[in-house]
């Protein structure tokens, strides 16, 4: 963008009452971070970037001294949007740089490297993201509870009374997301008490990732304004379904024609669609580390009973026609990847998903996807033969990622080393923690 164009953009923002920019990047744990800078600094933060101490950010791998100790978040001018929930401030998306070069541990840059592989083929990845979340409140003892005390139905899916009770929060979300350019599709109460889902239109992969991070920022801010906590924790309630972050994936070619769909093919998929699915299932154990990256994620990914009588936990590595008991659901000529949850780094999760799918397309040695047309939970209950299942805990998933050379090479050795170090430290902390459950069960045991 030219200086004249930047001047025009600054003038337009000033006319809208904007005085500051919220320059945001995403750390390797998936958390939006950044700082406020004056609007007048826009040319500088576009050309050089907003500066941050590199080692103060999770997962950069930058040293404490020298020219590469500074992390620079370069603002993308096209991303500038006034924040309706923070008057006078415009949101800005940043790419991570260090020493004047793209940072290989910046997850947004990792996703862009994978998308560059697609552009070489003339292909585009389209992604629809389905955010599920809980509305919580912190009580006087500091414990998190479902915010709506009246939300306690045994089977709460689509509960309209809860939507009415919480309409103030939901309507603020509608207003703010619409003002930010989201094309909203639906809002509903999900299958756990206190759980909701807001759906919006799909986009190309990078725009979809940026949009989800803006969704998360908005949801956290609006919840706080209502005295609530927006939670993307995968499984906050023990006997209820957890929150997923399903990816609806489709590919188009240079002529915008769909590449995954074939109305007369098995599951409605083309050969490309089947090979993409094969890549996802082949790398599913390693992908679990990136798409379900917390200790708590594996409490969602368990074969457990639910108070509502229904569970959607996608634990078996198979693909099925509109089959929500499989890890992959084929629907309307696209693939629904049901593994991710809201605790993931959206850029890294999408990059890994795309890398795995491309490996399935390019490498004929990747086994064909396991296709199932039965209810796998019913099969499990009856002792039938099941597909292989996902890792049962974060430690096993991290080991799978460390051992998956094609995926690590595609994402980059540097970013994977940083991610594995952070998550192995988290896994070790969990193992050193003594829970209330352990105290109640073992403290007075003979």
Image (cartoon, rainbow, N blue to C red):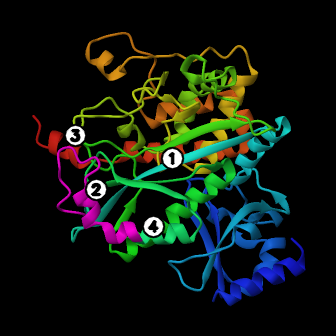
Q: Residues within 10 Å of mark 1 (few under 14, many from 20)?
A: few
305 vs 44: above or below:
above
User: Circle 2 — which element?
Assistant: loop
In the image, taking residue 119 as reference, residue 365 lies left or right, namely left
> Of residues 267 and 144, which is closer to you in this image?
267
Residue that label 2 marks: 194
- Chain-order first, disc 1 or disc 2: 2
Residue that label 4 marks: 174
197 vs 276: above or below:
below
In the image, taking residue 123 as reference, residue 407 lies left or right, namely left
Determine if residue 59 is in view: no
Identity of the residue drawn at 73% across and 35% down = 257
- Asked where in the image residue 442 lies, by quadrant, the reply is top left
Quarter of the image with the C terminus is top left
x, y percentage for residue 311? Answer: 31, 34
For discs 1 and 2, the disc positioned in front in the rendered view:
2
Q: Magenta stretch: residue 164 in it? A: yes
- Chain-order first, disc 3 or disc 2: 2
The magenta stretch is: 147-171
Q: CA distance from mark 3 to mark 2?
A: 13 Å
């Amino acid at each position: 963008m030219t200086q004249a164009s930047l001047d025009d953009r600054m003038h337009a923002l000033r006319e809208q009452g904007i005085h500051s920019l919220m320059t945001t990047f995403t750390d390797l744990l998936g958390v939006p971070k950044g700082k406020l800078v004056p609007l007048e600094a826009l040319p500088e933060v576009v050309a050089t970037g907003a500066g941050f101490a590199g080692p103060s950010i999770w997962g950069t791998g930058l040293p404490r001294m020298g020219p590469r100790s500074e992390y620079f978040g370069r603002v993308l001018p096209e991303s500038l949007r006034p924040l309706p929930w923070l008057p006078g401030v415009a949101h800005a998306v940043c790419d991570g740089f260090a020493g004047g070069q793209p940072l290989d541990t910046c997850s947004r840059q990792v996703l862009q490297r994978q998308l560059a592989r697609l552009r070489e083929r003339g292909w585009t990845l389209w992604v629809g993201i389905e955010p599920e979340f809980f509305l919580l409140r912190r009580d006087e003892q500091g414990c998190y509870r479902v915010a709506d005390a009246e939300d306690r139905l045994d089977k709460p899916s689509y509960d309209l009374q809860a939507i009415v009770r919480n309409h103030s929060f939901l309507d603020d979300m509608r207003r703010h997301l619409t003002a930010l350019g989201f094309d909203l599709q639906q809002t509903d109460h999900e299958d756990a008490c206190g759980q909701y889902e807001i759906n919006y239109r799909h986009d190309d992969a990078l725009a979809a990732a940026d949009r989800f991070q803006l969704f998360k920022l908005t949801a956290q801010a609006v919840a706080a304004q209502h005295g609530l906590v927006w939670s993307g924790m995968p499984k906050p309630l023990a006997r209820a379904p957890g929150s997923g972050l399903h990816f609806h994936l489709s590919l188009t070619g240079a002529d915008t024609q769909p590449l995954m769909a074939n109305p007369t093919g098995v599951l409605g998929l083309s050969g490309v669609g089947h090979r993409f699915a094969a890549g996802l299932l082949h790398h599913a154990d390693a992908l679990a580390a990136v798409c379900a990256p917390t200790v708590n994620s594996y409490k969602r990914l368990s074969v457990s009973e639910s108070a509502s009588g229904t569970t959607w936990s996608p634990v078996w590595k198979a693909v099925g026609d509109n089959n929500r008991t499989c890890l992959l659901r084929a629907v309307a000529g696209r693939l629904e990847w049901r593994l991710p949850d809201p605790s993931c780094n959206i850029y890294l999760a999408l990059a890994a998903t795309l890398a795995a799918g491309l490996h399935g397309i390019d490498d004929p040695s990747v086994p064909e996807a396991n296709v199932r047309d039965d209810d796998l939970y019913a099969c499990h209950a009856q002792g039938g033969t099941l597909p292989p299942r996902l890792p049962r805990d974060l430690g096993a998933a991290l080991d799978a990622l460390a051992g998956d050379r094609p995926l690590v090479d595609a994402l980059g050795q540097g970013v994977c080393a940083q991610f594995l170090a952070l998550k192995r430290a988290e896994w070790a902390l969990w193992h050193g923690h003594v829970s209330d459950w352990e105290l109640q069960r073992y403290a007075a045991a003979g």
